Image: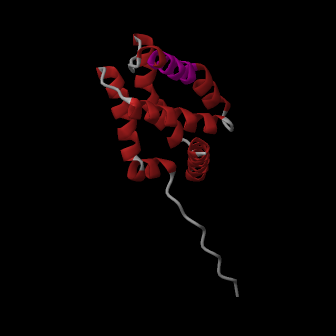
Amino acid sequence: MKKPRKPYKVSAPMLVNRHLYNTDMELRERMAVTAFSGGFANTQHFDTLLAMLNLLKIAGEHRADMKQYADNVLQPVMQSIRDRYGRTQKLGVSADELKVLRALPDVSKAFWNGQSVGFYNDCIDELNAYYSDLAEKRAA
């Protein structure tokens, strides 16, 4: 008699996971880009885009294509926005920077849809740990 097989731990594919659980995340991402596009961005919009960058940088530690995009395309735009804010106390973007920001939600979605849920969750956990450590350092 055959021994019964243990059931596999089942999780939804990333495409389904992103659609069911992360539509609010994508909406926030697109709202942040729209805020920069419309000229009414605030620091919360910047922080949303910064979290996207940080998540993609974490993923880039395992995927060279994403590392190249995060470091060479997105990071300079975010640094430029930060520098401009430091000088003027206004969050704005140039036309070229806006092109990068407008593409960001689509690039992010396409990338994450091709990844496993486990990899995505590991990256989210690492991002949350980073922000927790940062909050502790700021509180000290």
User: In this orientation, does residue 106 appear?
Assistant: no
User: In this orientation, does residue 125 appear?
Assistant: yes
Name the dominant secondary structure of the magenta segment.
Answer: helix
- Asked if residue 134 is among those painted magenta in the image, a careful observer would answer no
**Quick check: 121 above or below 54?**
below
Of residues 122 and 43, the one drawn nearer to the viewer in this rendering: 43
Residue 118: percent from left, percent from top? 59, 53
Left or right of residue 87: residue 136: right
Left or right of residue 85: residue 70: right
So how many labels did they put on this image? 0
Q: Residue at x 58, y 25 (%)?
A: 69
Of residues 99 and 49, the one drawn nearer to the viewer in this rendering: 49
Q: Residue at x 33, y 21 (%)?
A: 37
Q: Residue at x 41, y 19 (%)?
A: 89
The quarter of the picture where the N terminus appears is: bottom right
Q: Residue furthest bottom?
A: 1
Of residues 109 and 83, the one drawn nearer to the viewer in this rendering: 83
Q: Residue at x 49, y 21 (%)?
A: 82
**Quick check: 113 above or below 37?**
below
- Magenta extent: 73-85
**Quick check: 76 above or below 25?**
above
- Asked if residue 78 is among those painted magenta in the image, a careful observer would answer yes
The quarter of the picture where the C terminus appears is: top right
Residue 71: percent from left, percent from top? 62, 24
Q: Residue furthest top?
A: 95
Residue 128: percent from left, percent from top? 56, 48
Residue 2: percent from left, percent from top? 69, 83
